[in-house]
Image (cartoon, rainbow, N blue to C red):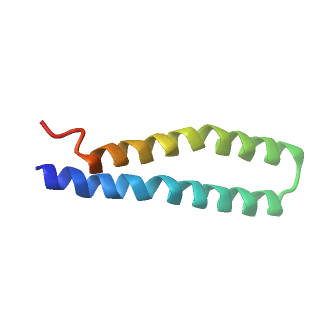
Amino acid sequence: MNQIKKIAGIIWLLLGPACVYFLVQAAAHEIAAKPGIDTKIQWGVFVVIFIPIAVGMSIFGYYAIKGEYNH
């Protein structure tokens, strides 16, 4: 079970930055398609709100790899 937790930790650790990358890429695409101020504000809020969530996912994965969740 501990090995499964470590594998899941690797997945979570890599998933955080990947999600931020794809979110920023989608935001840039949408802002380029409709460059209005409302679109910029909407996607800016999405990105700013999601970055701490992605950092938390990466921290969770880091601790899982370290073995902090082993009992």
* In the foreground, 62 or 15: 62
Q: Position of residue 17 (x, y in %)?
A: 52, 56
Q: Residue 39, position in %: x, y?
A: 80, 48
Left or right: residue 41 versus residue 20 is right
Height in image: 64 above or below 11? above
Quarter of the rendering containing residue 60: top left
* Left or right for 21, reference 39: left
In the image, residue 27 lies at what x, y percent? 70, 56
List x then y, in percent, for residue 43.
72, 47
Q: Is residue 10 left or right of residue 41?
A: left
Which of 54/29 is in front? 54
- Residue lying at 66% horizontally and 45% vertically, measured from the top left: 47
In percent of the image, x 58 and y 42: which residue is there?
50
Q: Residue at x 28, y 51 (%)?
A: 65
Q: Give the left or right position of residue 63, taking residue 36 as reference.
A: left
**Most distant residue in the front direction:** 66
Of all residues, the one furthest to the right in this rendering is: 36
